Image (cartoon, rainbow, N blue to C red):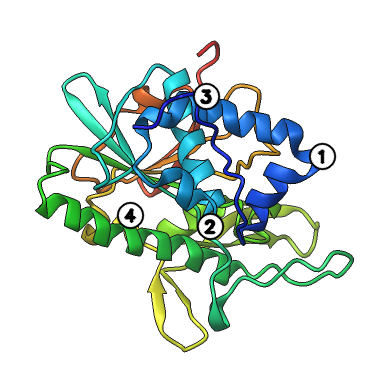
Amino acid sequence: MLPPQMPFFMDRPCEDQGYVNTRDHPRGIEHKRFVEDLWCRFHHLADTHFREDARNHFSQRFWEMYLAVALLDHGFNLGHQKDEGPEFYASVGNSRIWFEAIAPGPGEGPDQVPQIVFGEGDEVPIERILLRFTNALTEKRQRYAASLDKGIISPEDHYVLAINSEGIRHEPCGNSMPYFIQAFLPFGPLTISIDTKTGEVKDSFHRYRPAVLKKSGSSVSTRAFLDQDASFCSAVLHSGVDCANHPVHLGGDFSLLHNPNAQRPLDVAVFDWCEQFTFRDEQLHRSEPKSGV
């Protein structure tokens, strides 16, 4: 464990432009201070090479710190399992909730989410955006299995996959339904039925979309939360936060999608301070954050 007086940022050359800009740019002073404040409260949960690794994976490490401090602010008691397993766990009653943080980038190859070209009206590459979310679950499923085999995680523990989508270009542009929900439940494009005689809207619904296609032609499921393969995951927590854009009250940007087929479902009361989505009776239900929490 590193001493709290040791700063987060290191005065060494690195290739991560986000790290360099936050550390060195005159306009980034407030952002740098915010990151250092997070580090002061998070450092006891950091693994051995956290600061060093941040020089090449700044978005990922920032997200881990922000997530942890937001949870601490909402009364969670966090623990850390050395340098193995998910980032940290929260003790809630007699249960443990493990949090695995991931901050996907735009990807590589033919399925990469393209750069936004300002001033041009390109179509939002929704399927490629969804693939970044589905890939995050696939990647962390393997890590979950390894942690389970080593006895780090118990089958009785809850597991939350915390995804930060700030690095997925276009994603914050929004849609009629959050993309992270469309990636794990088979909701497709919004369809509107109009009365051709009166011009009035008769109905609106999301088309069923059980999968998206990669450029190679292979199919990737978007119904993970309706299948047993993802039952290990209690919920997906989502945010698009970065060090330059964050709410005053940390965690106010969180949205939580509960897995209806989870082996260890979460009580909605545990996260009543943030936006939550549940899927029951073939319908998606949204609940507002509890006021005053």
Q: Residue at x 55, y 81 (%)?
A: 109
Residue receiving disc 4: 225
* Position above or below: 16 against 159: below
Residue at 77% across / 65% down in the picture?
196
Return the x and y of residue 8 as percentages of the image width and height: 54, 36
Give the Cα distance between marks 4 and 3: 23 Å
Instruction: Estimate how packed mark 3 is, as few (under 14), some (14 to 19) or many (20 or more) residues with alpha carbons within 10 Å.
Output: some
Q: Earlier in the sequence, mark 4 or mark 3?
A: 4
> Number of numbered discs present?
4
The residue where tag 1 is placed is 27
Neighbour tally class for label 2: few under 14, some 14-19, many 20 plus, Cα within 10 Å:
some
Q: Which tag is nearer the camera, tag 4 or tag 2?
A: 2
Q: Is residue 94 left or right of residue 252?
A: left
Q: Kindly check if marks 4 and 3 are in contact, taking CB atoms under 8 A apart as contact.
A: no
x and y percentages locating residue 129 in the rendered image: 56, 65
Q: CA distance from mark 1 to mark 3?
A: 33 Å
Which amino acid is tagged 3?
Pro
The residue most toward the top is: 292
Q: Residue beneath label 2, please?
A: 56
Residue 186: image location, x then y, percent: 43, 61
- Identified by mark 2, the residue type is Asn
- The tag on residue 289 is 3
| Mark 4 or 1, closer to the camera | 1
Q: Which mark is residue 276?
A: none
